């Protein structure tokens, strides 16, 4: 093989590698990412909605923390779902390293906050259910439990999005 043929082969392999990374499911600008972001928005909204049905959630700091974090996750996920939807429609995925880095860091921060809020809310619900006292009526505790479960589902989707973007980031 001559030097020119080797360079052409290297360019072809590099182009195939970049093309496969551009088509990475779940990375920003793909239909899978749009589905993940939409799921995050739906689960976060339902978590916030179930928690807000109980007016007494202000009595517990963990529940207030969950409401605050879900209040941050909903606009973040919805905005990125709009960006992903637009990228899918115009068939132009986002591949600028700076923007991807911001999205990746935002995903990781919000994913960590979501996990901590879901865990703290679930532990408080468990404590209230185990206390056998008048601390939490069964109907209200079941709403809090559903809210914590929805927050966990939102975290799982957020973690998946951030891992896909982490996988894409080094290839840029």
Image (spheres, grey):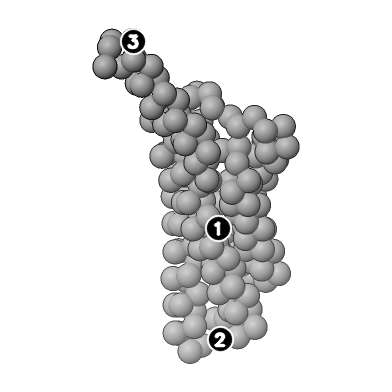
Please determine whether, in this image, residue 147 is positioned above or below residue 117: below
Q: Which residue is rendered at x = 58% and y = 65% of the image?
A: 150
Residue at mark 1? 154
For marks 2 and 3 on the same chain, the one whose residue lies earlier in the sequence: 3
Q: Quadrant of the C terminus?
A: top left
* Secondary structure of the residue carrying numbered label 1: helix
Q: Which mark is residue 134?
A: 2
* Secondary structure of the residue carrying numbered label 2: loop
For marks 1 and 3 on the same chain, the one whose residue lies earlier in the sequence: 3
For marks 1 and 2 on the same chain, the one whose residue lies earlier in the sequence: 2
Nearer to us in this view, 67 or 46: 46
- Is residue 73 among the parts visible in the rendering? no
Percent of width and height locating residue 30: 60, 41
* Secondary structure of the residue carrying numbered label 3: helix
Residues marked 2 and 3 touching at CB (< 8 Å): no
Q: Which residue is rendered at x = 47% and y = 36% of the image?
A: 20
Please determine whether, in this image, residue 42 is positioned above or below residue 166: below
Nearer to us in this view, 29 or 119: 29
């Amino acid at each position: 093989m001559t030097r020119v043929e080797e360079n052409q082969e290297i360019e072809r392999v590099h182009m195939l590698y970049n093309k496969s990374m551009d088509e990475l499911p779940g990375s920003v600008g793909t239909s899978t990412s749009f589905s993940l972001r939409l799921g995050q928005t739906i689960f976060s909204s339902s978590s916030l909605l179930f928690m807000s049905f109980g007016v007494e959630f202000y009595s517990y700091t963990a529940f207030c923390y969950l409401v605050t974090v879900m209040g941050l996750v909903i606009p973040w996920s919805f905005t990125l779902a709009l960006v992903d939807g637009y990228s899918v429609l115009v068939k132009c995925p986002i591949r600028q390293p700076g923007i991807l880095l911001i999205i990746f860091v935002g995903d990781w921060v919000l994913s960590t906050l979501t996990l901590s809020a879901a865990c703290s809310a679930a532990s408080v619900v468990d404590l209230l259910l185990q206390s056998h006292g008048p601390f939490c009526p069964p109907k209200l505790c079941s709403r809090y439990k559903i809210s914590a479960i929805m927050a966990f589902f939102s975290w799982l989707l957020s973690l998946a999005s951030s891992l896909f973007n982490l996988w894409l980031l080094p290839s840029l």
